[in-house]
Image (spheres, grey):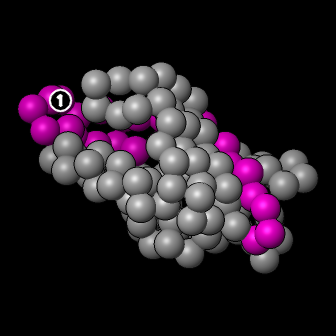
Amino acid sequence: MTTQEIATRLAELCKKGEFEAAQKEFFAQDAISIEPEDTPEFAKETKGLDKIFEKGNKFMSMVEAVHGIDVSAPLIAGNSFAFVLMMDITMKGRDRMKMQELCVYTTKDGKIISEQFYM
């Protein structure tokens, strides 16, 4: 698949909230996920698909309700692409909030090898 095809399909799956399905379909086994900073909940870097699944499951366990998800059109540059992910969510024990992050991905040989988030 081309970077454009991966970006388009990933955006579609993310918009439906099918994050783990997207990771299974597109992420390399040795992919890396990079957060804006190290937090008590999440390390700055998570390496390996199994650990990325664990990270996603941990995040979803902290969510009380998902009220809506939207994803911008992907912007492609060579083997990288980015889109804005917007989530209207209620975290357990917190007020409802709208979270926005820029998601940047790098591909190699038809797989995503890295994702990095900016807030």
* Position above or below: 83 against 11: above
**Residue 106 on image: x %, y %:** 73, 51
Residue for badge 1: 95
| Predominant secondary structure, magenta span | strand
Q: Is residue 56 left or right of residue 31?
A: left
- For the N terminus, the quadrant is bottom right
Neighbourhood count class around disc 1 (C-alpha, 10 Å): few under 14, some 14–19, many 20 upward: few
Residue 85 in percent (x, y) is at 52, 45
Residue nearest the observer in this picture, 19 or 30: 30
Q: Magenta segment, which residues?
A: 84-110
Task: Judge whether 86 appears above or below 95 on screen.
Answer: below
Q: Is residue 81 magenta?
A: no
Dividing the picture into quadrants, the one containing residue 3 is bottom right
Q: Is residue 71 above or below residue 3?
A: above
What residue sits 80% from the left and 69% below the top? Answer: 109
Residue 4, position as x, y percentages in the image: 80, 65
Per the image, is 96 magenta? yes
Residue 67 shows in the view: no
Could you say where residue 81 lies in the image, as x and y percent from the top left? 75, 50
Residue at x-position 20% and y-position 38%: 91
Which quadrant would residue 98 be assigned to in this image? top left
Q: Residue at x 57, y 65 (%)?
A: 29
Q: Is residue 43 left or right of residue 112?
A: left
Find the residue positioned furthest to the right.
78
